[in-house]
Image (spheres, rainbow, N blue to C red):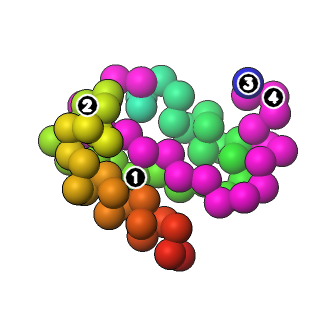
Amino acid sequence: MYADLNKITCPTLLVYGETEHARDLYTDKMLSLLPKAKMEIVAKAGHFPFVEQQEAYNELIKKFLMD
């Protein structure tokens, strides 16, 4: 999957819960390959921030889409 990430030219949002362990494994590489990517962290959430902190997650998505 990494080989094709640089082909994605639209703004891309990576969202992780603050206790998500995969964040440490993949984020730096993904950010370096996605030309218009940014990362946001949802406080007090793990692997499912969209469930665990639905309001905070939705605000991040809304802000990203409005920018």
Q: Using the image, tell me which numbered label, if any, was put on residue 40.
A: 1
Residue bearing the label numbered 3: 1
Which of 6 and 45 lies nearest the eye of the viewer? 45
Q: Secondary structure at mark 3?
A: loop
What is the spatial separation of the Cα atoms under label 1 and label 3, in whole angstroms? 21 Å
- Compared with residue 40, is residue 66 higher up or lower down, i.e. above or below? below
Q: Nearer the viewer, mark 4 or mark 2?
A: 2
Q: Is residue 6 magenta?
A: yes
Which of 24 and 10 lies nearest the eye of the viewer? 10
Residue under the image location 53 percent in, 28 percent down = 26
Mark 4 vs mark 2: which is more N-terminal? 4
Residue under the image location 50 percent in, 46 percent down = 14
Mark 2 vs mark 3: which is more N-terminal? 3
Q: Are marks 1 and 4 in contact (CB under 8 Å)?
A: no
Q: Which residues are magenta?
A: 2-22
Residue type at mark 2?
Answer: Gly
What is the spatial separation of the Cα atoms under label 2 and label 3, in whole angstroms? 23 Å
Q: Secondary structure at mark 2?
A: loop
Residue 44 point in image, percent of width and height: 16, 41
Residue type at mark 4?
Answer: Ala
What is the spatial separation of the Cα atoms under label 1 and label 4, in whole angstroms? 23 Å
Q: Is residue 40 magenta?
A: no
Residue type at mark 1?
Answer: Glu
Residue bearing the label numbered 4: 3
* Left or right for 54, reference 4: left
The 10 Å Cα crowd at callout 2, few under 14, some 14 to 19, many 20 or more, is: some
* Left or right for 5, reference 36: right
Residue bearing the label numbered 2: 46
The 10 Å Cα crowd at callout 3, few under 14, some 14 to 19, many 20 or more, is: few
